[in-house]
């Protein structure tokens, strides 16, 4: 059935042997279920094939239909195709993606093209993730984020992706081959030799630019990330036993954050390409215009990672804002940056610096750690320095007082967050004991392929599906069997969820009541007019 719906056509299955009438009946029941429980029939009626409208409406409403529609294969196939289209349009009431399309994969552009399709976009809400913020900041012109985005792409050998975007890295390649000769330490993970050299070249450019940003923005309190002067002192004094690498030909030991002329030429060239590329702009237009920082749907607060908080369970203040006010302020700033980018207007340097902080700052709602230890993982031998300490979000979610604070602040009943998935196969739970905090991550990054999940809400329950790994999917396809799915039930509703129980339903009820009040006011006004007429007639 799933394949028939996807392909929008009937074909015989050797295992299930369903005829056309079976398929039509099954598809009709799916649509009827949606009409009876969640969707407005008028919404479905608007999407019905005009040539078959009368027959399809009768099928859905259980009115009589001629047997010919089942017996004539040509007509039956057209009805099946039309019903498949309707099912696709109504089966999902709403799709919420919690971000990180750009998380180390090689086809984020293809994912966005799918999400940007008209039939999908109309019921889609996209929440920005930290990896999306990285690329949005890069496209807007932040040079350290450009270096970082490209460094990650080279680290995971995603050069074909860069080629599809039309990003010319020939200057970078030539520079990396010429400058970083000899063996490259194993901490640089790219599989291809040229990619490892570009990864190292970009890392040095990135660290130099980051330190410039940190020094220009002391309010970020990121002074602990200033490593290059420490590195220069180690190299000057020949105290290199704690380093994994000593080959830094472009670092001026007296001014380590200064870009070399070639590095400056390369990053300027890449910045021009990023900010003017039409292919990059197409992807970023979707993220800037259709993305948001958080979303409330059916009284569930959806966010990519976290709401910054303190050890004692209070909302953390940043830029003079905290809680919902902070998220609203940051969303406004990000949207303004996007508007300038899409209109090719110059950016405020403070706004570009903010995008860097949102990517890796400790008070960012996209990050959730004390620091991003990329420098240490590359160049410091002591592995204890590599650890990125998680902040207080996870611990605070277990506190009733903190959860109550979130629910009151946002007018929600639950919170769904992603960023890093729990590992259900190791016994970890997706939901908190009370079911109010739910961790959902699709697990599409190579690092999390065995840990992805999706959250499903029906009129009767709320549950998580543990997504199959690519290997499990391939094996099931080879065996021509459905993939076995693990399910975690989070809540079963005492009464089926109706439209009136949803956030949209509450808005409709409010609108209805407002119209009713206006009707009453009009009625009273009309009565006054009639009474005045009667009084005038009496006087006459």
Image (cartoon, rainbow, N blue to C red):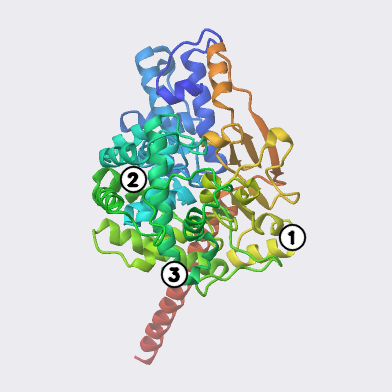
Residue 277, given in percent of the width and then of the height, sits at: 25, 46
Q: CA distance from mark 3 to mark 2?
A: 29 Å
Q: Which mark is residue 399?
A: 1
Which quadrant holds residue 6? top left
Q: CA distance from mark 3 to mark 1?
A: 34 Å
Of 211 and 427, the residue lying toward us: 211
Label 3 residue SS: loop
Q: In this picture, is 232 found above or below 202?
A: below
Q: In this picture, is 525 found above or below 192?
A: below
Q: In this picture, is 353 found above or below 270?
A: below
- CB-based contact (under 8 Å), mark 3 and mark 2: no
**Badge 3: how crowded within 10 Å, few (<14), some, or many (20+)?**
some
Q: Is residue 425 visible?
A: yes
Return the residue at label 3: 217
Of 63 and 86, the residue lying toward us: 86
Picture quarter with the C terminus: bottom left
């Amino acid at each position: 059935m799933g394949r028939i719906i996807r392909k929008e056509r009937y074909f015989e299955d050797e295992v299930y042997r369903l005829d056309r009438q079976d398929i039509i009946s099954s598809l009709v029941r799916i649509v009827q279920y949606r009409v009876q429980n969640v969707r407005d029939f008028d919404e479905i009626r608007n999407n019905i094939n005009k040539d078959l409208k009368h027959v399809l409406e009768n099928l859905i409403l259980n009115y009589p239909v001629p047997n010919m529609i089942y017996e004539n294969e040509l007509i039956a196939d057209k009805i099946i195709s039309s019903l498949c289209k309707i099912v696709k349009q109504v089966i999902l009431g709403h799709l919420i993606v919690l971000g990180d399309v750009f998380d180390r994969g090689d086809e984020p552009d293809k994912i966005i093209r799918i999400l940007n399709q008209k039939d999908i976009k109309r019921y889609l809400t996209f929440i920005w993730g930290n990896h999306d913020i990285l690329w949005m900041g890069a496209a807007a012109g932040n040079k350290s984020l450009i270096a970082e985005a490209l460094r990650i792409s080279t680290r995971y050998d995603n050069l074909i992706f860069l080629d599809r975007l039309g990003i010319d890295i020939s200057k970078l390649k030539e520079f990396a081959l010429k400058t970083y000769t000899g063996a490259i330490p194993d901490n640089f993970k790219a599989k291809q030799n040229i990619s490892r050299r570009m990864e190292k070249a970009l890392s040095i450019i990135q660290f130099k630019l980051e330190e410039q940003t940190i020094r220009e923005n002391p309010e970020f309190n990121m002074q602990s990330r200033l490593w290059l002067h420490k590195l220069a002192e180690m190299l000057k004094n020949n105290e290199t036993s704690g380093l994994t690498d000593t080959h830094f030909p472009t670092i001026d030991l007296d001014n380590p954050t200064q870009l070399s002329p070639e590095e400056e030429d390369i990053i300027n060239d890449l910045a021009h390409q990023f900010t003017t590329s039409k292919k990059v702009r197409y992807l970023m237009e979707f993220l800037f215009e259709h993305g948001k920082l958080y979303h409330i749907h059916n009284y569930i607060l959806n966010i990519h990672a976290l709401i910054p908080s303190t050890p004692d369970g209070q909302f953390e203040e940043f830029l003079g804002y905290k809680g919902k006010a902070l998220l609203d302020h940051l969303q406004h700033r990000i949207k303004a940056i996007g508007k300038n980018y899409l209109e090719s207007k110059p950016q405020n340097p403070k706004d570009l610096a903010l995008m860097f902080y949102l990517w890796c700052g400790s008070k960012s709602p996209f990050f959730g750690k004390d620091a991003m230890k990329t420098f240490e993982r590359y160049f410091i031998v002591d592995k204890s320095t590599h650890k990125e300490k998680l902040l207080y979000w996870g611990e605070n979610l277990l506190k009733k007082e903190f959860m109550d604070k979130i629910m009151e602040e946002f007018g929600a009943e639950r919170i769904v967050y992603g960023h890093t998935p729990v590992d259900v196969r190791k016994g970890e739970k997706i939901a908190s004991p009370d079911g109010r905090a739910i961790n959902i991550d699709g697990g599409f990054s190579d690092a999390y392929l065995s840990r992805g999940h999706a959250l499903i809400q029906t009129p009767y329950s709320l549950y998580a599906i543990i997504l199959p790994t690519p290997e499990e999917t391939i094996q099931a396809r080879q065996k021509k069997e459905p993939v076995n799915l693990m399910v975690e039930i989070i809540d079963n509703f005492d009464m089926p969820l109706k439209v009136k129980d949803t956030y949209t339903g509450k808005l409709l009820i409010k609108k209805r009541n407002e119209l009713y009040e206006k009707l009453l006011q009009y009625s009273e006004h009309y009565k006054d007019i009639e009474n005045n007429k009667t009084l005038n007639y009496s006087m006459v």
